[in-house]
Amino acid sequence: MTSGTKLRPEEDPGALAAAARAFLAAGEDIKPTPLEGEIRRAFKLLKDDLAKIEALRLSKKDVPYAEIFSAQPHEKVAALVFLIEHLLNDVAHGPTDCLEITDAKTDLTGHHETLLRLNALDAFAILYDFAWAQSQAEELPLWQKSCTYYLHTLARMTDARPRAYFFLKERPHARRQVEQLIASTDQNVAGLFRTLGEDYVRLRQEIDPAAAPSPPAYARLLLEYTTELPSPEQVGLAARIVAEERIRAVMAAGNLAVLARWVMHGSRRAARAALDAARGALPTSGYITLLEQALSLPDAPPERLAAAVVELGEVSRTLRQEGGESEINRLLVEFAVRAHAGQVGVAQLAVRELRAVNAFNDVLSVMERTSIVEVAEEGMRMMCEMRRLVMVESLVQRRPVLNLSYQAAHKHLMTIQELMNAAWGCTSDATAHVYLERLKELRAYPELEQLGLRHKHISTLANKSLAELRMQEMDARRR
């Protein structure tokens, strides 16, 4: 028995279930590349120092940047510039609603501050050249904004101003940008660049490119990294590598609320990394709690909510095939009841997961408590499938809005019963085959099971039809 209504994928519990299983499927289709290895190498060199800096910032303590970077300072600045370039590329092309891209934007602010505190003027010059090259290849606002930011930073670093003059001498396009910024309506910006521009014009005749200071060691070390950028399918690579470390830290701290956010709002690969970490480290009760917290996030997308519902269903069947695990049943009921209009498909999927373990009392509870008619109607269909329709009769009297779905379910069962009676009276395989095929189309599991167990003449055919129906169901679950 189906609703007969064509639904959008985010509203269709069947489509949501398929998307959820695809999301939860093990394995990774993108193989590690040499570029990924280089980004991981750079981040490994930096991660302990970056974690220390972040902890000090959060505690509002002074950060001794030079001291933290005192071991291998040039190697670490080169690695940081390389990481910044890739985080910029991820922000430029990654999804705006992805948690690690949001974090990358915050990280970039902190990384720029680190370079500024280390007085790494040449690092900002390198980053300017990187952003400028990208702006020439594609017109994205981020690249132009980045160029402006790096020019602004260079202008602010007054102690390194002589190096900035050489920077401008070598880049006509940077000088044109300075001229444009002098005309800014922001008087602070205009004044800063006016001073830089006037000083440059006054001294430009004296600037001998041959006298430019030698590049710092980190500039030479940066050349050891590849200039390759990720392919489209690898966009978000650097942000995800950083995210994996955050997920490990969150998992180690046992912070399930933050881990739940990664499951709901991280990229597919980051979210699966969070789930894998949880499966490997948490007891079953902790894993259930994680999924409960994921379901409670108000702004979670339907596909991720569906994944949490399907995963809860899998855990429930593992723990107790018939009737389901009581705590999981409760969570599925509460989600289905509190779901809002944008979560109807997921709420219906929760009802289907309750039906999968024949938790008819819990399905009935949803029908009684939900304010969304479509969810209650899904419960009606599931009670029909479980052959428990008699249990909803008093509910229909209290909620007349369900009368049409009850009549449809009742008619559906009457059709099945008529086919069952006809098949029961058959002694001919050919005639029985017609009725059995129709029962298979109607997914009449109990009736096919009864015929397979008790009918003298057509039990073999009935069992074959039942096996084919189960195989169809398994294939549908894999897709």
Image (cartoon, helix red, strand yellow):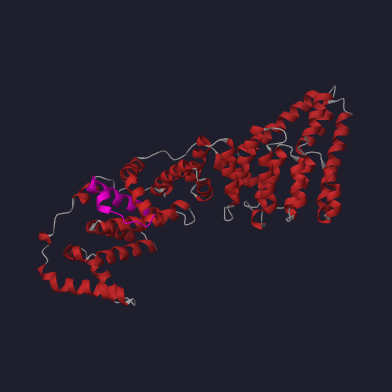
Q: Which residues are magenta?
A: 59-88
Q: Is residue 220 left or right of residue 107?
A: left
Image location (x, y in percent) of residue 450: 82, 29
- How far across and how far down the image is residue 393, in percent? 86, 47
Q: Quadrant of the C terminus?
A: top right
- Report the number of numbered marks: 0
Q: Position of residue 87 (x, y in %)?
A: 37, 52
**Percent coordinates x, y for residue 379 in the rendering:** 75, 47
Decide: is 312 above or below 336.
above
Q: Nearer the viewer, residue 441 or 182?
A: 182
Please say whether residue 173 is visible from this viewpoint. no
Q: From the viewer's perspective, is 267 left or right of 435?
A: left
Q: Is residue 246 left or right of residue 151?
A: right
Which of the 4 quarters of the picture holds residue 194? bottom left
Depth check, front residue: 323 or 172 = 323
Taking depth in this image into account, of 335 and 64 the one nearest to the observer is 64
* Residue 61 magenta-highlighted: yes
Residue 293 in sight here: yes
